[in-house]
C-alpha cells in the first residue's frame, strides 16, 4: 500500500472521530424530555395534552387544576395539589397509568417527573 493511501486513511479516520465527538458533545447539551404526552382533564372537562415535557423542574397544570391525569410518557410522574410542586398529599403515577380524583378532592395543580 503506498504511503499516500495510508495517510489518507489515517486522516479520514481522524476526521470521522472528530465529527463523532462533536456530534455527541452537541447532543448532550439538549434538554432531556419525558417522551410522550401527559393528558389531563380540567374541572370544566377540557382535555389538555402536554407533549414530551422536560424531565427537569416543575410543570404547572391549568389554573383550575386537573381532576384526572393520564401519564403516557416513558417516565413516572408525581402529582401535586400546589402549583409549585411542594406540599403533602402527592400522588405517584407510573408510566402508562392514570389517576382520577375523588369527587370532593382538591384538583392537581402541578407535576414533576422521576428520572
Image (tube, helix red, strand yellow):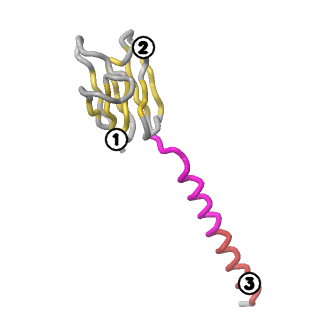
Would residue 34 appear left or right of 86 to someone viewing this image?
right
Q: Secondary structure at mark 2?
A: loop
The residue drawn where x is 36% and y is 22% is 109
Q: Quadrant of residue 67?
A: top left
Instruction: Please name the predominant secondary structure of the magenta segment in the image.
Output: helix
Residue 6: percent from left, percent from top:
70, 85
Instruction: Please report the bounds of the magenta region as a residue range.
Output: 17-33
Q: CA distance from mark 1 to mark 2?
A: 26 Å
Residue at image point 56% right, 58% down? 24
Cβ–Cβ under 8 Å for marks 3 and 1: no
Q: Which residue lies under the disc numbered 2?
A: 46
For residue 5, which numbered disc appears in the image? 3
Magenta stretch containing residue 26, yes or no?
yes
Residue for point 36% across, 12% down = 43
Residue placed most toward the observer, 109 or 49: 109
Q: Secondary structure at mark 1?
A: strand
Q: Residue furthest right?
A: 4
Q: Disc 1 vs disc 2: which is toward the camera?
A: 1
The tag earlier along the polypeptide, 3 or 1, is 3
Residue indicated by mark 1: 114
Measured as percent of width and height from the top left, residue 3 is found at 74, 89
Location of the C terminus (image quadrant) = top left
Q: Are marks 2 and 3 in contact (CB under 8 Å)?
A: no
Which residue is at the front of the view, 103 or 10? 103
Q: Earlier in the sequence, mark 2 or mark 3?
A: 3
Amino acid at each position: 500500500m503506498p504511503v499516500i493511501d495510508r495517510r489518507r486513511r489515517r486522516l479520514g479516520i481522524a476526521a470521522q472521530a472528530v465529527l463523532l465527538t462533536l456530534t455527541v458533545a452537541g447532543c448532550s447539551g439538549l434538554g432531556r424530555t419525558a417522551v410522550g404526552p401527559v393528558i389531563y382533564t380540567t374541572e370544566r372537562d377540557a382535555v389538555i395534552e402536554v407533549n414530551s415535557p422536560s424531565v427537569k423542574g416543575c410543570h404547572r397544570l391549568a389554573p383550575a387544576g386537573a381532576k384526572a391525569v393520564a401519564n403516557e410518557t416513558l417516565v413516572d410522574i408525581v402529582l401535586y395539589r400546589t402549583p409549585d410542586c411542594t406540599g403533602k398529599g402527592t400522588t405517584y403515577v407510573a408510566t402508562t397509568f392514570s389517576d382520577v380524583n375523588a369527587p370532593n378532592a382538591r384538583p392537581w395543580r402541578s407535576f414533576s417527573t422521576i428520572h
